[in-house]
Amino acid sequence: MSGPNFALYYAGDAYSTAAKIMGRQSAGKALMKGVARRWPDGEIHGFGPNRAAGKTMAQQLKRDGHEGLVRWRPVPGDAVLEQVGAVYYPAPVTQDLAHIRNTRGPTAYSLFGVTHTLSSEAGMDSLSKLVLAPFQAWDGLICTSSVALSVAHRLQAEMREWQIEHVGATRFNTPSMKIIPLGVDAPACARTPAQIEEARTALGIKADEVAFLFAGRLIFHAKANPAVYYRAVEAAQARVAHPIVCIEAGVFPNDSVADGYRRARADLAPSIRFIEVDGADSVAYDRAWKAADVFTSLSDNIQETFGLTPVEAMAAGLPNLVSDWNGYKDTVRDGIDGLRIPTLAPGPRSGAGSDLAQRHATGADNYDFFIGRASMATVVAFEPLVERIVELASNPDLRRRMGEAGRARAVAEFDWPVILDRYCDFAAELGELRRAAATLRKRPAIPFPIRPDPFVLFQSYPTHHVGDDWKIEAVPLDDRGLDRFLGLHMARYVIDDQVLPEATLRAVHSEAAKGGQTVGSLLNGVGRTPASWKALMWLMKLDIVRAAP
């Protein structure tokens, strides 16, 4: 295959950690590098409303080692995009994008997205609405974990039931959904003995010390509350001969949270040495990973859906100590490449969280309080955690075996080129569904409802509407000609190569200058398009061309 059988919807913030360092951005950045590794000289198609994004995409792929062609397909798509067959969107696909695709015909191409956090209002809405128009059965969703799939099914069932009860709906979309995990850049995560020694020396970690690493956002209400971990590691230290060192690598959102972490460490784990590493410092952050003996992430938060760092730990050859929570259930094999700690939460019939959902929906609690309150009602079992810390801290052979098993699995199952091949397989499955539907019945283009042509929606605003039979007259200009007006920012700001090309303006003006034209003959002469209409009106607005019945 010379390139993927799908185009990438390119929005820079989804593929870069420059603005923020979160799982979604980290995964997107690694995906782009994976594309460059999987198809180093292949043809990659980008898609989106802004051609400038296409240039950024090409530059990013080139930095990642891609030497092939990058082609841009503008919204709403074209014949080439329809031949490619599908568009990957770096989140659940939006209804607006599906409506836009449908303006070319609902079978023009498939759309598929991927889950990230599911606890936000936007996340829940996007999953539930996949069963409604304008989506089709050949549109899909990649669920990064089995729990993500279960949440999607649950939200969609609730949406169907509500629509049946309150609207009398009888027809629903059945989106294609498949579990495919997020990937990692496995080669980049690998560690050598020399790198490990250098990193431990730089961080002042002695040969007999066992380093437990947490890497990620340092935010107790939205990632993982470390209080039980601090208590457990303090209790474990009394049962372990070797000193335990805790590395916390990440970024605090503010000084208040940072102070909260430091006070909790001193109070709950006074005998443990903590090493704080700034996650915004890429060199220091990489050093923290290289120096560790064990990776730990005791997530207790509903905003976590997959959990990328345990897979990165596998790729680094580190054993995992994680909570039995969310996507960790799929990625960390208990007893093989890590240990999972049981978690507890109120049952689904308890009603314990009904007020939390309502308070968030009405704005009484913001999103941080919504997920933070749910986190404080989630338990990571204390005694099993202590036992597992003791087990890992005391047994270097166990750490080595688990690290080697995790590394082998990361390379075989989670490396981005491997994951991207699964994306291609999913796109191919969607294509089969789309082609079968197109064969059964021709699917014409569908206008975008409640987003009509503004000159249709607001047709009652003007005094008159310009008609095809109106006569055209070009107004004589001075020596500067059309350039006089093209130099005015207040007139030029709407000119671009997609909506209103300068070449179209000049062609319309040249045609009008011939004389003896009507609006209809002029537009037919230059090619009747939305751009030529707007060019004519631009010229009329500036009194360069006049038209009258």
Image (cartoon, rainbow, N blue to C red):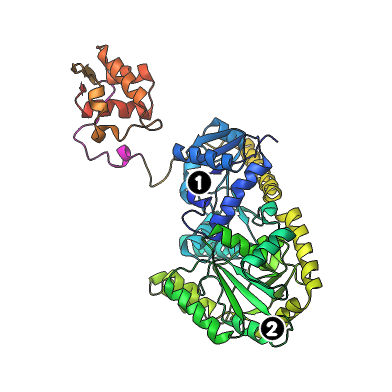
Dominant secondary structure of the magenta stretch?
A: loop
Task: Answer whether residue 187 is visible to the viewer in this image.
Answer: yes
Magenta-drawn segment = 453-469
- Residue that badge 2 annotates: 386
Give the mark nearer the N terminus: 2 vs 1. Answer: 1
- The answer to whether residue 171 is above or below residue 538 is below
Q: Secondary structure at mark 1?
A: helix
Which of the image's four quarters has the N terminus? top right
- The answer to whether residue 484 is above or below residue 232 is above
Q: Residue at x 28, y 21 (%)?
A: 519
- The answer to whether residue 497 is above or below residue 217 is above
Which of these two is toward me, 310 or 538?
A: 310
Residue 98 is marked as: 1
Tell me which amino acid carries mark 1. Answer: Ala
Which of the image's four quarters has the C terminus? top left
The image position of residue 421, as x and y in percent, is 70, 46
Tell me which amino acid carries mark 2. Answer: Val
The reply to whether the magenta stretch includes residue 457 is yes
The image position of residue 485, as x and y in percent, is 23, 26
Q: Quadrant of residue 322?
A: bottom right
Q: Nearer the viewer, mark 2 or mark 1?
A: 2
Residue 544 is marked as: none
The reply to whether the magenta stretch includes residue 66 is no
